[in-house]
Image (cartoon, grey):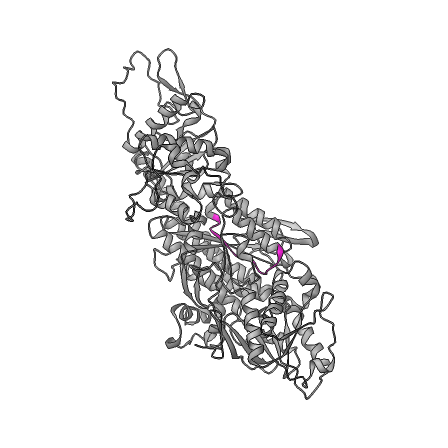
């Protein structure tokens, strides 16, 4: 049960609770999860799903049901201090016999309310077990599948408590018994002329808004309703992704419907084949303008003629880099396979994620267009590889997946948060609106690009709307505090700073000069701000001097003096705590006072410069022979060197996810057949983290669907908190923390401009530094 602002009982919103509930109800307190003797209690009868605005009604309904000897799970009574609201919510939707959804205009705007009733509906899609019992508290619409389920119209008795109580208990009894046969003999309906033709609308029960009473005869008569009339209880009509119930339709109509479905599938297949053929022939699907079309496409033109929004098909692409757009087209072709599989296998688990990143390049740094866009291209490549495994190879018109036919179908919506995520607030609002209109379109949000204050606010907004966020590479401290539904695939900056301080002590350094953009640290760059603060704290613990060498202005222009830059101060180390776009200027400036001969003071850079180092053309712009070290979050794949691109990874030293990524059907096939081969000499970390991020969501969806439930945003978030995933980047354990603090971080060393490959010099895992990088 939730409000539109967030889940009741979460850190966002905590309801009041009456301390003396058990005494007030005249019964002993009970634990809804466990019986007093420690044995698991039998399933409760009802889980009441409601929003805060209707809490009074929820408590009244719960009271009447418990007075009638039913067992009820109600958040206002059962989510006591100290309980985990997510666990209790999962218990409510999964372990109670039935879910009661208290429908109102406020409830229908609640994302958590939607996920709760949808979970119950997914567990009983045909309605034979009546697991979902809608109760209308006011005359509100019943959108989507709710309109096919007969509801209890409690609002029609809202002025008479006794009548409302009797109506509630009678209808609940009818639902449990499966029939509403009256106790007395029905009145003889003779004496009234029969209609010449049967009514075109379905006759509802006496309490439906489309039914009126004939005062003379006392019998219900049909009338035209302003809203669709739900089916009768005796003939439940359930539409599950195109499935038609033969109990409500005559056999000829069923055959006709089947023919229509076959024709539509044939048309869809032809469209997919044509689209795939067009893509393979190189004809572009669209430009990067704001002219896309489709149910899951929403784009606007922001300032500086920038196109932001989201898209699920090639009618709308984002960015200016040709490789980035090629990756987008490939993802959208994989979506066509997802749509085909979803139509052909409606009971197969389905999960749809939104990849949100800064896809518009910075116009002031177009010389770094590839450097700016390549990380997003790599992330999409990793996600795409997971799509192909789940949905099939889009070059094969049958879209036969590598994975089992019971595996989740993976669909991806691509969203542009604008240059440096400056427009992420608007796009976040658009994505939340999409999730409210169609919850199946958004199971989770991934990506998020960079740790800024705007990104943190977006994560909080997604959490308030009930949408989980899984970030592949964000590391700014404290992001997990913005939302209980936030998950991070890499350790935080605090852990990186701890490794840098330990490495400086290991190298017997007594001073570390930290270079960073002061404007970013004082502004909204959460990554740089927290990293610099963490370094200051960790170096102080090691009794190593911290020299603040921050520069002013948008780019690095500071010319260091000779004693700082050149050999002669053997007890010094330089640390670069900036972004990749500034690293080339930084290195050239550092070389100014040491044009030849002496080696620079040891330079260690943060993980943000990884793209500069791994992308050989950019590294070639650095002074030849410059030796630097840099932090890597993914040495497990990087230290395979070129074997991962070649598909010849050693099976004896890799787990299954690494073999899938670096095997003959992994990156070795993805790039030559579907994407342009990257120019770097070894795999960058973005593709691998994109692969693992999509993989951990697929794993959560697979686990959720194992008990015949379709994945939802709520169930995905709940399952992620119980997930320990052995991926290509190592073990991601969210069972102890929603941030992957157990992941290994390493320091790699490389000689730039020579084509050399990196070597590992230091590592940290589970907070323990070590010289051995591979253990």
User: Quadrant of the image for the N terminus?
Assistant: top left
Magenta highlight on residue 674: no
> In this orientation, which residue lies closer to the viewer: 633 or 290?
633
Q: Which portion, as a residue range, is magenta?
A: 441-453
> In this orientation, which residue lies closer to the viewer: 625 or 462?
462
Residue at x 70% of width, y 54% of height: 304
Residue 552 locus on image (x, y percent): 73, 67
> In this orientation, which residue lies closer to the viewer: 375 or 529?
529
> In this orientation, which residue lies closer to the viewer: 181 or 460?
460
Location of residue 253 with respect to 330 vertically, above or below: above
Relative placement, left or right, of 354 versus 575 is left
Location of residue 700 with respect to 122 vertically, above or below: below
Location of residue 389 with respect to 437 vertically, above or below: below
Q: Quadrant of residue 554?
A: bottom right
The answer to whether any part of residue 614 appears in the image is: no
Residue 285 locus on image (x, y percent): 55, 56
């Amino acid at each position: 049960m939730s409000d539109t602002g967030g889940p009741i009982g979460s850190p966002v919103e905590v309801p009041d609770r009456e301390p003396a509930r058990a005494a007030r109800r005249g019964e002993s307190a009970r634990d809804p999860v466990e019986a007093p003797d420690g044995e698991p209690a039998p399933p409760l009868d009802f889980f009441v799903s409601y929003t805060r605005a209707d809490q009074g009604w929820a408590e009244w309904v719960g009271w009447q049901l418990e007075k009638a000897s039913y067992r009820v799970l109600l958040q206002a009574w059962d989510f006591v201090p100290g309980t985990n609201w997510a666990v209790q919510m999962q218990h409510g939707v999964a372990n109670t016999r039935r879910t009661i959804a208290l429908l109102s205009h406020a409830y229908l705007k609640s994302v958590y309310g939607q996920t709760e009733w949808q979970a119950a509906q997914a567990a009983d899609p045909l309605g034979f077990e009546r697991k979902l019992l809608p109760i209308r508290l006011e005359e509100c619409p019943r959108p989507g599948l709710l309109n096919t389920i007969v509801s209890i119209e409690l609002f029609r008795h809202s002025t008479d408590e006794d009548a409302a109580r009797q109506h509630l208990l009678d209808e609940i009894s009818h639902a449990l018994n499966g029939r509403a046969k009256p106790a007395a003999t029905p009145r003889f309906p003779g004496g009234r002329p029969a209609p010449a033709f049967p009514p075109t609308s379905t006759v509802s029960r006496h309490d439906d808004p489309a039914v009126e009473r004939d005062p003379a005869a006392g019998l219900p008569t049909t009338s035209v309703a302003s809203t669709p009339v739900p089916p009768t209880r005796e003939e439940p009509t359930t539409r599950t992704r195109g499935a038609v119930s033969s109990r409500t339709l005559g056999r000829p109509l069923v055959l006709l419907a089947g023919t229509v479905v076959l024709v539509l599938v044939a048309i869809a297949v032809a469209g997919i084949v044509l689209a795939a053929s067009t893509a393979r022939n190189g004809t572009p699907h669209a430009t990067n303008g704001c002219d896309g079309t489709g149910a899951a496409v929403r784009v606007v033109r922001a300032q500086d003629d920038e196109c932001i929004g989201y898209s699920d098909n090639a009618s709308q692409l984002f960015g200016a880099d040709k490789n980035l757009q090629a990756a987008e087209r490939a993802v959208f072709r994989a979506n066509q396979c997802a749509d085909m599989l979803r139509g052909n296998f409606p009971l197969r688990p389905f999960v749809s994620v939104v990849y949100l990143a800064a896809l518009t390049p910075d116009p002031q740094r177009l010389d770094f267009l590839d450097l700016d866009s390549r990380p997003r291209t790599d992330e999409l490549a990793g996600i795409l590889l997971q799509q192909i495994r789940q949905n099939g190879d889009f070059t094969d018109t049958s879209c036969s997946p590598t994975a089992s036919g019971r595996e989740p179908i993976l669909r991806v919506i691509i969203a542009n948060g604008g240059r440096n995520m400056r427009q992420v607030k608007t796009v976040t609002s658009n994505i939340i609106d999409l999730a409210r209109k169609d919850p199946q379109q958004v199971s989770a949000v991934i990506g998020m690009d960079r740790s800024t204050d705007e990104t943190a606010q977006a994560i909080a907004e997604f959490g308030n709307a009930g949408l989980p966020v899984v970030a592949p590479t964000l590391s700014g401290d404290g992001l997990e505090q913005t939302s209980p539904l936030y998950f991070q695939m890499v350790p935080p900056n605090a852990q990186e700073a701890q490794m840098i301080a330990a490495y400086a002590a290991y190298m017997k350094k007594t001073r570390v000069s930290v270079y960073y953009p002061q404007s970013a640290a004082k502004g909204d760059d959460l990554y740089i701000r927290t990293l610099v603060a963490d370094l200051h704290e960790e170096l102080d613990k090691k009794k190593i001097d911290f020299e603040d060498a921050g520069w002013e202005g948008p780019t690095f222009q500071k010319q260091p003096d000779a004693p700082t830059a050149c050999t002669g101060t053997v007890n010094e180390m330089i640390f670069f705590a900036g972004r990749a776009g500034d690293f080339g200027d930084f290195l050239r400036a550092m070389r100014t006072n040491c044009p030849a001969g002496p080696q620079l003071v040891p330079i260690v850079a943060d993980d943000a410069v990884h793209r500069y180092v791994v992308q050989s053309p950019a590294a070639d712009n650095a002074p030849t022979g410059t030796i630097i070290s840099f932090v890597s979050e993914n040495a497990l794949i990087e230290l395979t060197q070129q074997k991962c691109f070649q598909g010849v990874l050693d099976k004896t030293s890799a787990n299954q996810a690494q073999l899938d990524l670096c095997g003959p059907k992994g990156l070795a096939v993805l790039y030559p057949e579907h994407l342009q081969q990257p120019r770097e000499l070894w795999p960058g970390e973005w593709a691998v983290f994109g692969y693992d991020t999509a993989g951990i969501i697929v794993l959560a969806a697979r686990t959720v669907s194992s008990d015949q439930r379709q994945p939802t945003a709520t169930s995905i978030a709940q399952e992620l908190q119980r997930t320990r995933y052995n991926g290509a980047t190592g073990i991601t354990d969210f069972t102890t923390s929603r941030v992957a603090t157990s992941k290994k971080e390493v320091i790699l060393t490389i000689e730039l401009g020579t084509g050399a490959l990196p070597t590992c010099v230091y590592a940290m895992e589970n907070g323990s530094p070590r010289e051995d990088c591979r253990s």
